[in-house]
Each structure stands twice: as structure tokens, then as C-alpha cells.
Image (cartoon, rainbow, N blue to C red):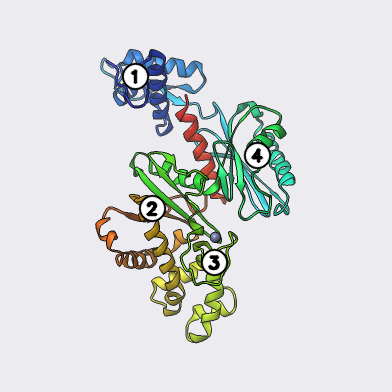
């Protein structure tokens, strides 16, 4: 008897088979090897059905025989083992920036095979940046000894507002490239080959990586806030991004947290979260505050302009009054932002990514205290505020690329 989730497929035989294929293939993502018996138990399908499905996956090149297991099945025979063919397809992630365009090529286990970077001034040059993206893709393929036909998809993680459905970069906030840029179509033409191209905000890809890391334990509604000198984020509900009609959802950096501020943001508003918590601004404020703390070694570092955000985070945790005072308004801005996120999206978990993912226990405790002043927060006792679980420095690879690679992996295994 087969067990099929009635919500995820129709009852047509081919749909049921495709659904079951997907279930079996997905098991191989997180398991080095599997026997027919193990698969049968996990997906609750008969061994005969599983054998047929595995044979089909082998014919498609997605699964490989992996020898015999050491333990014995009933009857004393050593079971045949199977494994994912990590090289059945490859994935490319690209992250264009002001001064660098970075790229990485991944296998299906989301391991980086090759990474490359081009350097230049891409701030105002869309056409030049596009040409460099093509060059970067060619360099990645050459370094890995592959052709574009072996690539399942290319994900471009951009800054700003993106129409993901149509692959249009509507408004690149930190790059003067113009507006309504048909990036997917332009890249498709420039590559002169049919290949799946996904264009999205880089923070949404990073959110995807965070969700994937949590696997089955990921909450139904998770929000990520990625905060460095710019801030983005995403809302993931039931494995899907919520981007809104215009792609604005997740642009948490532009929620106004200090309306009376004179600090003007790239978006034209004053007092945006992004500008108020940007490390460049916080370190500048630290320098201005430092003369009032002549006995603080951290204040002296601020005056010498070699203070870092990590110094402030660890100093605050060690009861350094100067560090705590510098971080106090930042904590208030985070509390206002989270307050608004809770009201808008009511998530189970809010994950802080980027620089502030290193802010430590003191910052998180203070944040919880600030939020406890908000009456609804008392009701929302299931809300978890956590720091990113993504590796801090994955061989120096840009985390946005890991996010885009994870997104493509998810896409691949979701579409057998
Ligand atoms: Zn703004």
C-alpha cells in the first residue's frame, strides 16, 4: 500500500510516481548511503515499489550504487547500498556588489567546488556588470572543467527590490544601475544558452540557507534580519518566501525606527533601521562618545579608530560601561524593529544574521528585556529570537552565495 500526502499531489498514477520519486531522492540529501529496506521503512512504500523508483533514479543519473552494507537484512544477505550522485548537476550562485562580483559553483550536496571574484567599479555600470557576470560564470565553468549544459541553475542574489517571478531587478538600492532591469532576460541572452536563472534579493537566499540548516525543525513562519552596513531580510512561511506584491516584504532596513533622526537613508527617508544600526555609524558614535570615558581601553581604541563591533559586543558582555552605552540605542532600534515584525508577520522565530549575529548573550538578554515592555510580547511566549546558525567563515566564502546555492539545491530536489 502506498502512502501519499493528498495535499501535495493529484491522484494520477504519474503524479503519484513523481511524488514518490521526490520523496526517495530527498532522503539521499541527508544520508550518505541507503538500502532499499531503509528507504522502504522511511517513505512507507513497498520494497518492490522502492526498487523500481531507485532503478529509475539510477537510469536518470541521480543515484549511484554504493556497494554492499556491512549489516545483514533478514535472511543474512548484505544489503545493496545506494547514494546520491552529487555530480548529477551543478549549481552556480552570483552576488554582484559595488566593487566585487563574487561567484561559486556547487555540487548537489551544496559543497563549493570553485569560487571566483572579479574586482572593479560596478557602482553605476549595469551593462559592464552584466558582462562581468558572464565572464565570472565562464571562469567558474572552466575552473571546474564543466559546460553550461551540466548546470541545473544560476541564482543571482541582488541588493534591492526584485520581481522574482519575472526576473526583474526593480530597484537596486545601493547600486546606481537604473530601475526595472530585466536581469534574467539580459543574462539569458548574454549566455546564449538556455539555462534556468533565478534572480532574487540576496537576503532572501540567505534566509533560505538558514531555514535549510534547520531542516525538519524549521518553524512554519521564520523571519530573518540580515544586518551589516545595509539591512535586509525575509519572511519564510511554509518553505515559501513572502515577498509581497512589489517585493517589499523583508526590506526591514527601511522600517523607520527614529522618525526625528536627521540621518538620511539611501531610500530617501530619515531614521531607517539600516542607517541607525550600521556599524560604520555605531563606530563613529563610539568615537564621539569616547572622550567621556577616559579610563576605558575600548574608548581609547575608538579614539584611535581601531575599535571593532566585536570589541563592543565582548566589552558589553564584560560590563564595560562605554560599550554598553554605545550599544544602548542600537538595542532600542532592534527592539522597535522586532516589535513591528511581530505585529506584521507574527513569526515563531526571528533570526539575526550578519554583523549582529555575533553580538552575544548580553545583547540578546537586553533585547529580550526591551521587548518585554511590549504587552503583546508577554502573550507571544513562543517567539524565539536567535542568532544565525550559518557557519561564520565557510572558507572565506560570501554567505550570500551559500544562501543562493542552498536555494537552488532546494529547487532541484523539489522538482524531480
Ligand atoms: Zn531607508
Q: CB at mark 1 closer than 8 A to ligand 1? A: no
Compute the Cα span from label 3 to label 2: 21 Å
- Relative placement, left or right, of 330 versus 10 is right
Is there a contact, CB below 8 Å, between mark 4 and mark 2? no
Q: Secondary structure at mark 4?
A: loop
Which of the marked residues, 3 or 2, is nearer the chain's N terminus? 3
Q: Which mark is residue 78?
A: 1
**How would you rate the neighbour count of disc 2 (Cα within 10 Å): few for under 14, some for 14-19, many for 20 or more?**
few
Which of the marked residues, 3 or 4, is nearer the chain's N terminus? 4
Q: Secondary structure at mark 3?
A: loop
Is there a contact, CB below 8 Å, between mark 1 and mark 3? no
Compute the Cα span from label 1 to label 2: 55 Å
Mark 2 — residue?
344
Is there a contact, CB below 8 Å, between mark 1 and mark 2? no
Compute the Cα span from label 4 to label 2: 30 Å
Discs 1/2, front = 2
Q: Secondary structure at mark 1?
A: loop
Which of the marked residues, 1 or 3, is nearer the chain's N terminus? 1
Does residue 307 appear in this view? no
The picture places residue 256, in percent across and down from the top left corner, at 48, 63
Compute the Cα span from label 3 to label 4: 30 Å
Which of the marked residues, 1 or 2, is nearer the chain's N terminus? 1
Mark 3 — residue?
270
The picture places residue 204, in percent across and down from the top left corner, at 50, 46
Q: In front: 16, or 257?
A: 257
Mark 4 — residue?
182
Is there a contact, CB below 8 Å, between mark 1 and mark 4? no
Amino acid at each position: 500500500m502506498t502512502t501519499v500526502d493528498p495535499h501535495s499531489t493529484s491522484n494520477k498514477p504519474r503524479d503519484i510516481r513523481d511524488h514518490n520519486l521526490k520523496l526517495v531522492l530527498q532522503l539521499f540529501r541527508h544520508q550518505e548511503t541507503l538500502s532499499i529496506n531503509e528507504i522502504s521503512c522511511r517513505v512507507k512504500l513497498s520494497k518492490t515499489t522502492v526498487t523500481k523508483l531507485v532503478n529509475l533514479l539510477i537510469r536518470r543519473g541521480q543515484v549511484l550504487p554504493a556497494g554492499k552494507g556491512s549489516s545483514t537484512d533478514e535472511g543474512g544477505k548484505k544489503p545493496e547500498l545506494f547514494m546520491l550522485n552529487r555530480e548529477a548537476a551543478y549549481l552556480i550562485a552570483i552576488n554582484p556588489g559595488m566593487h566585487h562580483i563574487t561567484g561559486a559553483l556547487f555540487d548537489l550536496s551544496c559543497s563549493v567546488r570553485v569560487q571566483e571574484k572579479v574586482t572593479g567599479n560596478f557602482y553605476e555600470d549595469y551593462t559592464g556588470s552584466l558582462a562581468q557576470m558572464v565572464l565570472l560564470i565562464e571562469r567558474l565553468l572552466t575552473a571546474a572543467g564543466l559546460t553550461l549544459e551540466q548546470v541545473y541553475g544560476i541564482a543571482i542574489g541582488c541588493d534591492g527590490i526584485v520581481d522574482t517571478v519575472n526576473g526583474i531587478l526593480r530597484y537596486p538600492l545601493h547600486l546606481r544601475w537604473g530601475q526595472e532591469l530585466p536581469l534574467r532576460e539580459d543574462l539569458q541572452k548574454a549566455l546564449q544558452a538556455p539555462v534556468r536563472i533565478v534572480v532574487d534579493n540576496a537576503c532572501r537566499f540567505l534566509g533560505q540557507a538558514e531555514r535549510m540548516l534547520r531542516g525538519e525543525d524549521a518553524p512554519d513562519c521564520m523571519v530573518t534580519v540580515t544586518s551589516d552596513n545595509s539591512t535586509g531580510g525575509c519572511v519564510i512561511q511554509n518553505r515559501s518566501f513572502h515577498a509581497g506584491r512589489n517585493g517589499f516584504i523583508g526590506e526591514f532596513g527601511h522600517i523607520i525606527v527614529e522618525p526625528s533622526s536627521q540621518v538620511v537613508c539611501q531610500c530617501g527617508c530619515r531614521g531607517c533601521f539600516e542607517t541607525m544600526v550600521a556599524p560604520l555609524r555605531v563606530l563613529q558614535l563610539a568615537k564621539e562618545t569616547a572622550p567621556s570615558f577616559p579610563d576605558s581601553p575600548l574608548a581609547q581604541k575608538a579614539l584611535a579608530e581601531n575599535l571593532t563591533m566585536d570589541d563592543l559586543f565582548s566589552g558589553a558582555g564584560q560590563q564595560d560601561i562605554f560599550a554598553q552605552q554605545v550599544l544602548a540605542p542600537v538595542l532600542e532600534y532592534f527592539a522597535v524593529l522586532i516589535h513591528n515584525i511581530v505585529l506584521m508577520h507574527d513569526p515563531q522565530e526571528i533570526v539575526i544574521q550578519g554583523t549582529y549575529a555575533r553580538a552575544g548573550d548580553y545583547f540578546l538578554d537586553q533585547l529580550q528585556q526591551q521587548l518585554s515592555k511590549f504587552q503583546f510580547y508577554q502573550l507571544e511566549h513562543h517567539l524565539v529570537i536567535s542568532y544565525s546558525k550559518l557557519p561564520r567563515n565557510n572558507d572565506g566564502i560570501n554567505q550570500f552565495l551559500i544562501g543562493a546555492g542552498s536555494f537552488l539545491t532546494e529547487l532541484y530536489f523539489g522538482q524531480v
